[in-house]
Amino acid sequence: MKQAPLFSVPQSHVYTVSELTLAIRYLLEQNFPLVWVEGEISNARRPPSGHFYFTLKDNRAQIKAVLFKNQLPWLKFRPEDGIKVICQGRISTYEPRGEYQIIIEYLEPKGYGALQLAFEQLKKKLMDEGLFYKKRPLPCLPSHIAVVTSPVGAAIRDFLRILLKSSPNIAVRIYPVKVQGEGAAEQIAEAIYDLNRMNWADIIVLTRGGGSLEDLWAFNEEIVARAIYASKIPVISAVGHEVDFTISDMVADLRAPTPSAAAEIIIKRREDLEKKLKEWKGSLLQALNKQRINSYSLYLDDLSQSLLKIIARFVAYKKTSLKNLKERFFATHPKRQIINYREAIKKDKRTLITYFKGHLKGLNQYCQELNHRLNALDPLAVLKRGYALAFTLPKRQIIRSANQVRKGDEVLIKVAQGEIRSKVEDIKE
């Protein structure tokens, strides 16, 4: 049966342009209410109106297309020239220019998941901006850990079980957020900003359990990546399992393959530092003991030389006394000589005792002086008097001159009771 004309007008009726384009639009919208079309995007543009205009083409034809701005937030990828897509829309006309076009209701990349394409596009964009190359060092002895995650997931249970088992003195604060679904990315980013404003934590840990690409998508959003990059507090990303990689892993200062691995990394850095401190303590004590042994050895050498001189002088004196005694004995009366010799021996004895007492007193004073010198050379004694040692980071070289550091450098200050990490604000040579 033949269809009746759209407009029952005489054959001689003359259409206005508006009437004709309106009739064509009505025919197109009635006969093509919703169609699927595949093709390649070209001439893509987005004017100030916010709508997305492009041409959909193949090797033989092309058609104008428009995606209105209220549909754009639902896209998981960024449409660009050269991308082959499958779209669903309705055919209509744009009357001011007399062009027919397809008004897009749904758009996805052909042969490539929209989420995966969006992941690759954002990865390339952030890499070109340099967001993957800024890596802050983690503190060696963190005492406050902030965990951004769901408070009811298995990830936080595994993290706390391992961390607090080995380091029960570490303070942990959980910042509860959604880790998937609508609004999750915004909550995660806001959590990072809030923790930086509070300035409580030494490390921020982003974590959740494994899942599909859709489940982990909140950690692939640009808003989360930029919040991590802007954080002044080092960030560890522990999202999913070992095979899962997210944008947050790439921007974070350190990626942990699992939530449990994040806790082990923090513990291991603490244990490594404690081991290194023990080694430094042993080396320092060994050096001090060696210095003491050398000092005592020099003292004993001096004491031995002094005693040998005293003995030599005593022997020489004794020989002289015996010789004089013998001569006197034979020169005078024996009994008188014996009495004189006894008196002389007593006098000599008192002289020797006085001499030895005075010499031993001098040696004792010398020992005390050496001990004072040794204590003065002890680095720990110097530090206890209020002094400090400054080291460059990360090489830990002693700073002897102001020109060894620059403004903004981090330095390590060793005091008698611990260490202080500081940043150089000003330099005066």
Image (tube, helix red, strand yellow):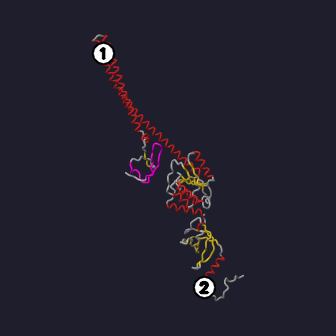
Asked if residue 173 is positioned above or below residue 127 in the image, the reply reads above
Q: Which residue is the site of mark 2?
A: 16
**Label located before the other in sequence (1 or 2):** 2
Residue reaching furthest to the right:
1
Asked if residue 135 is positioned above or below residue 327 in the image, the reply reads below
Nearest the viewer among 217 and 167 is 167
Asked if residue 292 is positioned above or below residue 321 in the image, the reply reads below
Asked if residue 391 is positioned above or below residue 187 in the image, the reply reads above
Give the x, y percent position of residue 298: 38, 32
In magenta, the rendered stretch is 401-424
Q: Would you say residue 402 is visible in this rendering?
A: yes
Q: Would you say residue 58 is visible in this rendering?
A: no
Label 2 SS: loop
Give the x, y percent position of residue 100: 60, 77
Q: CA distance from mark 1 to mark 2?
A: 159 Å
* Residue 420 located within the stretch drawn in magenta: yes
- Please name the amino acid that badge 1 sits on: Leu
Q: Which residue is the site of mark 1?
A: 325
Drawn side of residue 427 relative to residue 271, left or right: left
Quarter of the image holding residue 108? Answer: bottom right
The residue shown at (55%, 68%) is 80
* Residue 300 located within the stretch drawn in magenta: no
How many callouts does the rendering have?
A: 2
Label 1 SS: helix
Nearest the viewer among 130 and 160 is 160
- Please name the amino acid that badge 2 sits on: Thr
Residue reaching furthest to the bottom:
12
Which circle, 1 or 2, is nearer the viewer?
1
